[in-house]
Amino acid sequence: EILAAVRSTLSGGTGLRGCRIIVTAGPTVEPIDPVRFISNHSSGLQGYAIAGALAARGADVRLVSGPVFLPTPPSVQRIDVRTAEEMKAACLAQLPADAAICVAAVSDWRPETVSSRKMKKTAEAPPVLSLRENPDILATLSHVAKRPALVVGFAAETDDLQSHAEQKRRRKGCDWLLANDVSRHPFGGQKNQVLFLTENGTESWPEMTKPALAEQLAERVVAFFQKQD
Amino acid sequence: EILAAVRSTLSGGTGLRGCRIIVTAGPTVEPIDPVRFISNHSSGLQGYAIAGALAARGADVRLVSGPVFLPTPPSVQRIDVRTAEEMKAACLAQLPADAAICVAAVSDWRPETVSSRKMKKTAEAPPVLSLRENPDILATLSHVAKRPALVVGFAAETDDLQSHAEQKRRRKGCDWLLANDVSRHPFGGQKNQVLFLTENGTESWPEMTKPALAEQLAERVVAFFQKQD
C-alpha cells in the first residue's frame, strides 16, 4: 500500500491536463417493479481507481456511476445513474470528450415491461420475465459523431477469454479492450488480471491490485495523448 | 440522534435476557449466471436496527443477513447469506428460538435455471427468464415443528396496504405483521411508517426513524415475553 501510494504520487502530475475523460463504473440496475430488479455484480472498485488515477494526472474526469458504496476520488466529477438508459444519456451529455473508459458492468438486458405496482405472488405459475436489449454504451461511444479519440472497454468473461475478447473489441469498435476472467478473479476482489487488447495485438498483464492496474492504464492513456500531440 | 441514543440507553436493559431471537435483514440475491442476478431493494437499515435494539435488551440475536453494507450491531451474531434458499437454511439452523423477526426482503422468485457460464448476447432475441418460486421463509418459520413462540413479519406494499397486509398475516401464519407503503417511504430512507397487525387488530404507528421503530418493536417483544412468564 505504501508502494502504491508512492507510485501514485510519483506518477501523478499533469500529463492529462486539458483532457476530458468519461469513466463509467459500477453496475446498472434495471427495475422489474418498484421493489425488484435485475443487476450485475460490480463493486465499482476498478472504475473508481481508474477515475482517481486519471484525475491525479490532471484529467477532467466525469465519472458516470451506477449505485456503489464508494467515496468519489479527489477532483472527480461524479454523475450518479441507475439504469443503462440513464448511463448512456449521462455519457452522451458529457461529450465532447477526449477519451471514454467504460468500466461499468452494464446490464445487457432489461425487463420488457416494468410494473408500476409490486407484482403479487399468486397461486398460479410464477411470472416469466421477457427481456429486451439495453443500449450498448461502449459501442455507442465508439461510433458516435463526436467520438472521443480514445475509447476503452472492459469485458468480464468466464470462458475462452482471448477469443471472446478479440471478437468483442472488433464488434464494439473500441480502441482498447481490457478483458478479465471473472471465474478466476471474483467480483469485489482487490486484485485483477487482464488481457490488454489493441489493434496491434494482445498483451497479458500480470496479476496486480486494482489501483496498480489503474495506474498502469492511466500511464498508457498519458502516452496515447503524448503521441497525439 | 442524541434523543435516540438516550432513549436507546434508557430502554436497554435485560428484558430479553435468555431469549434467542432470529432476525433476517437485507435483500436476497438470486443468480441468473455468474455475473447477473435478480434482487430487491433493501438497505438492511430496519433489520439491523431491530437486531441492535433486541441485543441491547439482552437477547441472543442471530442476524441472518443478505448482502448489505452495514456494520454488525454490538453483541449480535451475524450469519451472511445470499439466496433465499441459503437464508431459509440458516434460519432453520438457528432453531430452537424464542422469536423470529423476518425483516429481509426475500426474492419471491428465482431463475428456473442458473447458467454456469456468462450468457452471451447474441444476434437473436434476448432470453426469456423463467422464474420459480422461492421458499417462503416467514411462512416456514410460522409452521415449523419447533415454531418460535413469536413470529413477526414485514411486508412492503405499494397499494391497498391494509387489505394486502391482513391477507398476508393470515396467509403466512405469523403473529405480528408490520406493513409499510414503499411507494411513500422509499427504500434506503431513514424513516418508516407502518401498520402493526396482530390477531387483535391493526395499529397505525406514526412516522418515525428506523431506529425509533426498532425501539418500539423491541419494547413490544419485551412485553410479549413478560406476559408469557
Image (cartoon, coloured by chain):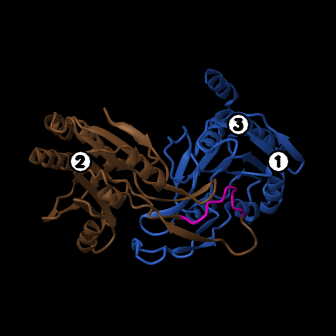
Chain colours: A blue, B brown
Q: Which span of residues is magenta-colored?
A: B111-120
In this figure, which residue is indicated by the disc labeled 2? B214
Between B80 and B191, the residue placed more toward the observer is: B80
Marks 1, 3 in one chain:
yes
Between B83 and A83, the residue placed more toward the observer is: B83
Marks 3, 2 in one chain:
no
Amino acid at circle 1: Leu
Q: On residue B162, which mark appears?
A: none
* Marked residue nearer the N-terminal end (1 or 3): 1
Residue at 52% x, 76% y is A113
Outermost residue on the right side: it is A200
Q: On residue A197, which mark appears?
A: 1
Amino acid at circle 2: Ala
Q: Position of residue A67 (x, y in %)?
A: 50, 52
- SS at badge 2: helix
From this view, report whether residue B7 is shown above or below residue B182: above
Specify few, some or many for label 3: CA neighbours under 10 Å numbering under 14, 14-19, or 20 or more: many
Query: Which of pointers 3 and 2 indicates the residue nearer the eye?
Result: 2
Outermost residue on the bottom side: it is A124
Q: Position of residue A121 (x, y in %)?
A: 41, 72
In this figure, which residue is indicated by the disc labeled 3? A213
- Main secondary-structure element of the magenta-colored stretch: loop
CB within 8 Å, label 1 to label 2: no
- SS at badge 3: helix
Residue at 32% x, 48% y is B47
- SS at badge 1: strand
In the visual, does A210 lie left or right of A27? right
In the visual, does B36 lie left or right of B182? right
From this view, report whether residue B173 is shown above or below residue A129: above
* Subunit bearing disc 3: A
Residue at 40% x, 71% y is A118
CB within 8 Å, label 3 to label 2: no
